[in-house]
Amino acid sequence: MAEKGMNRNAQRSIRLLKEAFMELLAEKPYESITVSDVARKADLNRGTFYAHFDNVDDLMRSVMADTADTISEFLSKAIEAGFLEDPLPVLTQVGDYLDQNRELTCKLVESRSVEPFLLALENRFREWVQQRIPANTPQEKRASALLTDYLAGGVLHTYRSWLVGDYPGVEIDEVNKYLSDFVRSTGMCLADLKLG
């Protein structure tokens, strides 16, 4: 949905509907949220909802796309010099976003309906990592592909586990520090492979 070309009232309605949806996610399972619930919470009518979204799934996809776009923006703004040498700036931005929006992202992660979103987010992260791992020879390309899957899967799974409370008492800064150390160590292993 292209919100930039819309008038202010349409943009405001979309924002209110998304905010209402996120509030409802904090109150009840995604599967039980209806169009009427969202419209009522946003203090708008159902017609306004349907002017912008086909159904609750469409609204959910829009909210998920916003989240993925925000994380992609962090990745694109990240320092280009060596993710494997210094991953902490990127991880800090992503981790801080997840922490500040923990209630929403946790609900998104817990919902069975968001597997396509998580897969898309993992693919974006995988592509981003792949672009930052130099690979010239066939052996380096194979190692790079394996490393990319390992890093993308590991980092995102760790964030997911943190969001759903698998690490009680662990703050996001500590998660990011460990992940940063692990990514750097992985980068050193890749360098050893290239030298060997």
Image (cartoon, helix red, strand yellow):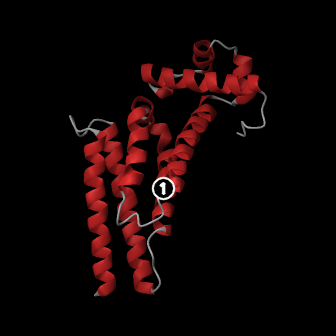
Please state which amino acid type lies under the numbered disc 1.
Answer: Ala
- State whether residue 180 is above or below residue 196: above
Query: Based on the displayed image, in which of its 4 quarters is residue 48 positioned?
Result: top right
The residue lying at 42 percent from left, 46 percent from top is 94
Q: Going by the image, does 113 lie left or right of 174? A: right
Q: Is residue 116 above or below residue 48?
A: below
Q: Position of residue 84 (x, y in %)?
A: 36, 66
Q: Name the quadrant of the C terminus.
A: bottom left
Q: Is residue 195 left or right of residue 78?
A: left
Lateral position of residue 3 relative to residue 73, left or right:
right
Residue 66 is left or right of residue 102, and the answer is right
Picture coordinates of residue 117 (x, y %)? 51, 45
Q: Residue at x 38, y 36 (%)?
A: 99
Image coords of residue 77 (percent x, y)? 52, 54
**Residue named by callout 1:** 78
Residue in front for this viewpoint, 23 or 181: 181
Along the viewing direction, whichever of 7 and 160 lies nearer the viewer: 7
Q: Quadrant of the N terminus?
A: top right
